[in-house]
Amino acid sequence: MRAPVAVVLALCVACTDPEDPEQTATESTMGVTSSTRTASTESSGPRTSTGAAETMQDASSTGGEQTTDTTTDDSDSTGRTDCAPAPDANPAWLGGYLDEIVGRLAGATELSPGVTLAERSTPMNRAATADWLETEFAALDLDVERHAYAAQGTNIVGRLPATESGGRTLIVGAHFDSVPGSPGANDNATGVAFVLALARYLGSIECRTHDVVFVGFDQEEVGLVGSEAYAAFLVDQGEDVIAVHTIDQMGWDQDGDRAIELERADAGLYEIYEAANASLAAPVTLHATGTGFTDHVSFRAYGFAAIGITEEFVNGDTTPHYHLSSDSYDTVNFEFLASSTVLANTAFAMLIDAG
């Protein structure tokens, strides 16, 4: 993940922060921005609800269910038939699936038949992980592509297409590499498990307005290399991206408060999770922070709105096994990982609702 630090439905326009030295330096290094997006100033402080969040809360209260005048037609004004409400955001399979994915990636079980990895830092082990992730995406019926940006660097991309035409694209990603000598259970097998579980859940939603692209980023641990390459690729392809959501370290909750941090949320993105959280029977605790140093940073340099999602990195309840050989499967708090994933399932069910 990152070095330690001191301390939509409003379909978001791109945000950069000219006052953020880290971001400014990154942008000047990259030397590339998207000319189709405009910049606005972001704040790392707590955010208040907006009209976007209120719209999402309205969708939540109806469960995404649409009404139709059956006396005249069996479709609504968009021409589509009525859609079933989104399934339960905490499906029965969730806990076991998260456990399985983290176990495979962290070497507690075989990654694939005959392959068990003690770490995911070497070119050989990262390639094996990429191959496995490609298979997992395909098993979830995603449209899979390999984004080979270098001889020994490959992002794995799985697209869940919209069921309705005319939508845009949401990006969700997590890095799959680890540092040398570390199983990387929390950093970042938990993030990969989160992304896969979200993909599995969203695939069960009947009607979807937007494409959702799920990405396993390579080489985050050596300078956000994979995510930077993918951000540049999105610009080259002219992908119409609403926003990018990245997950890094989501498996530690020693005080049991189920709190997560939303990192440098660009305009409207904090409110997405705030509205989703308000609809949960057992809400989690949300903190807004200004943290960088992980994959969401790469995308702002290219003009995309972004947000990072993590455990309490700034607020002090973060893994003591960071970048150590002890970052193992048996240190992960799977209940915490599940509660955070349920929040994301709820938020994205609102975002892709075809109503």
Image (tube, rainbow, N blue to C red):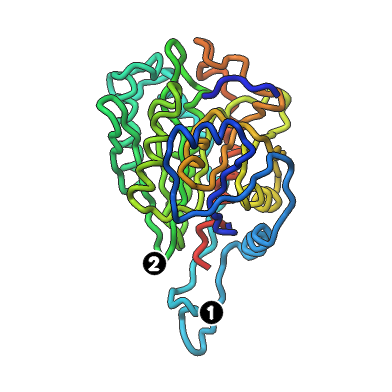
Mark 1 lies on residue: 68
Q: Which residue is drawn at 70% across and 44% down?
A: 283
The residue furthest left is 151
Nearest the viewer among 287 and 203 is: 287
Residue 193 shows up from this direction: no
Q: Callout 1: few (<14), some (14-19), or many (20+) C-alpha neighbours within 10 Å? A: few
Q: Comparing marks 1 and 2, which lies closer to the viewer?
A: 2
Q: Is 87 placed above or below 109 here?
A: below
Nearer the N terminus, badge 1 or badge 2? 1
Q: Residue at x 64, y 45 (%)?
A: 42
Q: Is 5 placed above or below 350 here?
A: above
Nearest the viewer among 26 and 326 is: 26
- The CA distance from mark 1 to mark 2 is 20 Å
The amino acid type, in three-letter code, at marker 1 is: Thr
Mark 2 lies on residue: 165
Nearest the viewer among 117 and 130 is: 130
